[in-house]
Every structure is written in C-alpha cells, then in structure tokens.
Amino acid sequence: MVSTPIRVGIDGFNLALPRGTGVATYARTLSRCLTGMGHKVDVLYGMNITHRMSTDLREVIFFDSLGQEVPSKRTKLFSSRWWRERRGDLAGYDAVPIPLSGRVDARGFTARMPAHDRLLNVPELFHRAALHYRYARRFTTVRIPDPPAIMHWTYPLPIRVTGALNIYTMHDLVPLRLPHTTLDNKSYYFRLIKDLCIQADGICTVSEASKSDIVDFFPQATPKIHNTYQSIAPDHKILEKAETEIAREIHGAFGLEMDSYFLFFGSFEPKKNIGRVIEGFLESKSSRCLVLVGAMAWKSEQELRFLERGIQLGRIVKIDYLPESLLGALIRGARAVLFPSLSEGFGLPVLEAMAFGTAVLTSREGAPREVAGEDALLVDPYDTAAITDGIDRLDRNDALCTRLAAAGPSRAALYDMDHYARRLGTMYDTVLKAAKR
C-alpha cells in the first residue's frame, strides 16, 4: 500500500451535474477516502471558466455552474475560438486553478463538494474531448501545474493528464452487454473502451462481475485491471437517530409510517428493471405502498406503463429527487429496499440499504449478488412472478425481514472506508511499480 502521501487527481465530469448520479457519489467517496489516506487531491472540471477570468470571478462562476446545466456553446466556424479549440485538440490544454477564497457563500454545496486540495478547470473539457475522439480517435491531453502522480478518472473518458499515470474506472459494460438498455453510441463506446485498455496505465473496476465482463470483451485489459469495489460513508447523523425521530421525519415529509412501504431509489432506466419492480409489486398481496425515488430516464413510457395505475390506486408514491438526509431517513423507515436490477457495476443502493439496517431484495446474479452475499433475498430479475413472490415473503415474514436487516450492517462493513483504502492503495502501488520497470 502507498506509504508516502502523493498527489492524486480525479475528474469532475459527474460532480458538476445539478443532480446526483452514482458516478458522482463514487467520485466524492473516492476523494474523501484519498484524503483520509493522507493524499492530496486535485479535482479537474470542464466548466465555462477561462484563464482570462480573474480568480474571484472563477470562484463565482464555479458555484454558479455547479447548480445548473450549462449548455455547450456552438463555436462559429473559423472564428478565433474555433482556431483556439483546434490548437487545444492537437496540442493539449492547460488547466487553470479555481481558488476558493470563501467570499462566495457555498454552504448549500457542502454535501456535493468533493474533498480536495486544488480545484482545476479546462473550459468544456469533456465535451471537447468527446468530439475530438469521435472525429480523430485521439485522446485530448491536459497539462496541470505540478501534476498529480496519478490521475484517477472516475469514468471512461478520452483524456490524459501529461506527467501523471492515468487510471480509468470502468464501472460496467452495460452498453455492450445489454445494448438495448442504454442510449450510448455503441461504436464510439466500444472503440473508446478498447483504446483505454491499450493506453491506460491502469484500469479500475468495482466488482468481480464487472472485471469478468471487461476481460471477456477486452482480453488486453487483463494485466492492467484491478477491482477495488466501492464504499460508502453513511451519514452517522442518520444512523444515530432514534426510530421515533426517523418516524417523525418520514411522516412529516411524506405522510408515511415506519415499516409501511417498500422503497426503490435510483434512476428510472431499463437496466434498473423498474418496470418489473412496479408490475411485481402491483401483483403482490401487500397492503403496504411502494415508494419510488428517482428521475425519469429514456424509455420511461414502456418501463413505467403501470406507474399511473399504481398511483391512482394509492399503492405507489413517486418522488423525483431527495437530498441525502431525507433519502437516508426513507431507507431506514422502509420495510425493505427493492433493487432487482438487470445489471450493475456494483449496486450501491444494495450497500446503502444494508448499511442502514434495512432488508434488501435484489438480483441473484452479477454484482448485486456479489455485494449482498447471502444477506439479501435474491430473485431472478427477469421473472416478474419471482419478484412478486419475494415481495410477498418480505411483506408477511417478520422474522425474515428482521434477520436480513440485522445482517446488513456487518455485510456493509466489508466495504467500509478502511477496506476501500487498502484496495486503492494496492492498486496504486501496483501501477506505480509497473511504471518504474
């Protein structure tokens, strides 16, 4: 494990999005773990912040951009900006620092900010890099002053930081394994993953299931790939609250009682199997309701064809988005979390529910099975009748729910920050040693 503190960079590709994503959670957790290990952390963003702006204005624009979708500006052909971008595509870009003076009141962003030593930016980096790779099949290079020893990209991106060892996280290969469930350009994605497997100094993934998929598609990744799993740092304020306080919160916010509902949280997209979750629940005999927390995604009409019926019957409650504290309270108050996903890189909701001591129903295959072990109720995610049966079992069997809820925290502890730090340290050690050969 890396014994001497080093500087590690991560990207802000998902961190800048207005609403949370699983990859944003991954990036924040990674940054906090690295800081806990004693490393200095750089975070590289791609906002509309330029070197021409004063340092004070950079700080203002940073927090202004952090809370909203900022569309990429269309560049006029052969304009000075167009030529500047062409030079950057070919010669690389220089990252500029975003100093935080404290003049901007950023308390509203505390939960969303990664742990960091430096914040850096290249204007529209991720958009520009994707276009450059699509048309030229070349990676964009970025120069950072006093570059990190390791640049740990939290997502497959066609970018390299010069002077650093570049590690890329591949969470899963869902666009290739289940191509009908995503909107990715499959040709672009295949080429990018293949090129990353060749050019990366290291490849990080988050489960043995994902590692197996990656190596199966791209055998050249074998000597470079490392499974570090993921981790969470559950909010101790939520963990330490008495059940009576949790009950007050969920009743006050949602009109729900403790143990009176099943919970699904995550994006509403095909791979999450939300359609079968809803159908399976409506076919169950449960008198409890189903609470769905998440944003609509593509193909929602087909996936959610039973949603309106469930809402009209009073059996389904839908919530678009919740802050971490309220979501944690909902998890703690649920009878069980339902997460029979078709495919996951890791399956963070499974771990989050277990850490909060809530029973889980999840898939009997892939990463969710790997994360949950035998401490969840496992079902065939393609079998709606099996999902219905699992819901009925959890609904009626208090002893089963109690056993699974009690086993959850111990299982979740296998993925705590200490274990995560050791796995990260081992990966970084291996990559650093390989670079010296």
Image: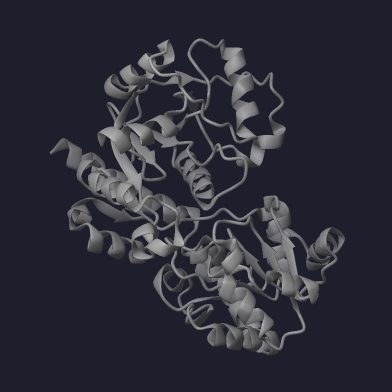
Please tell me which residue lies in front, 322 or 371: 322
Q: Is residue 262 left or right of residue 300?
A: right
Image position, residue 331 (x, y; %): 68, 65
| Visual colour scheme | one colour
Image position, residue 51 (x, y; %): 48, 13
| Residue that appears at 62% across and 45% down | 19
Task: Report the residue that reaches farthest toward the front.
Answer: 77
Please tell me which residue lies in front, 387 or 164: 387
Task: Report the residue that reaches farthest toward the left.
Answer: 437
**Residue 360 in sight in this render:** no
Image position, residue 140 (x, y; %): 31, 30
Q: Is residue 331 left or right of residue 312?
A: left
Q: Quadrant of the C terminus?
A: top left
Image position, residue 311 (x, y; %): 76, 71
Q: Does 416 appear above or below 54?
A: below
| Residue 63, picture quadrant | top right
Q: Is residue 245 left or right of residue 17?
A: right
Q: How many marks?
A: 0
Please tell me which residue lies in front, 11 or 342: 342
| Residue that appears at 42% across and 29% down | 125
**Residue 68 in sight in this render:** yes
| Residue that appears at 59% across and 85% down | 390
Q: Does 18 appear above or below 323?
A: above
Q: Does 386 appear above or below 169?
A: below
| Residue that appears at 39% across and 60% down | 174
| Residue 312, picture quadrant | bottom right
